[in-house]
Image (cartoon, rainbow, N blue to C red):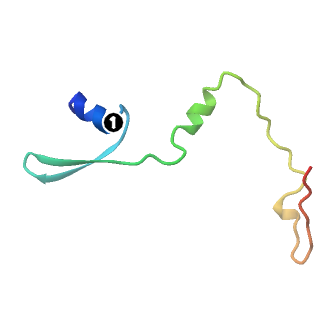
Amino acid sequence: MLPAEIRRRDGLQAGQAFEVERLERGDYRLRRVAAGANTGLVDWLLACPVKGFMEQAVAEETTDDIHPGSHHCLALG
């Protein structure tokens, strides 16, 4: 457990991950491990109180439908 002053000063929060490096007996270095860009995204989305808002897109074509040498244009709208 780190003292509250250190946690407050460095913005440390419960659940963050750290690497611990032993420098010598009784001396250690903590290095905060950066979370991945999407860490917690799925949990956040699942916690949304509005269910059924997003619908899966129906694909009329797939990349399997594209043949070498053919010219396909992306139609927006």
Q: Is residue 46 above or below residue 34?
A: above
40 with respect to 75 (left or right)? left
Look at label 1 and name its amino acid.
Leu
Would residue 33 be found to the left or right of residue 60 on screen? left
Q: Nearer the viewer, residue 43 or 11?
A: 11
Does 57 appear above or below 22? above
Nearest to the observer: residue 67 or residue 27: 27
Tally the marks.
1
Q: Quadrant of the N terminus?
A: top left
Where residue 13 appears, as percent x and y from the top left, is 36, 33
Q: Label 1: how many residues lie within 10 Å, few (<14), some (14-19) or many (20+)?
A: some
Q: Nearer the viewer, residue 67 or 42?
A: 42
Q: Give residue 5's position: percent from left, percent from top.
A: 23, 30
x 86%, y 50%: residue: 59
Left or right position of 2 against 53: left
Kindly indicate the quadrant of the structure image that contains residue 49: top right
Q: x, y percentage for residue 66? A: 87, 67
Query: What secondary structure is marked by label 1?
Result: loop
Q: Give the residue number, with chain letter if any, for mark 1.
A: 12
Identify the residue shown where x is 37% and y is 38%.
16
For the point 57% across and 38% down, the residue is 41
Q: Position of residue 3 (x, y in %)?
A: 20, 30
Most extreme residue toward the front is 9
Q: Residue furthest top?
A: 49
Q: Residue furthest bottom?
A: 69
Q: Along the horizontal axis of the image, is 22 left or right of 47? A: left
Q: Residue 75 lies in what quarter of the image?
A: bottom right
Q: Is residue 38 above or below residue 13?
A: below
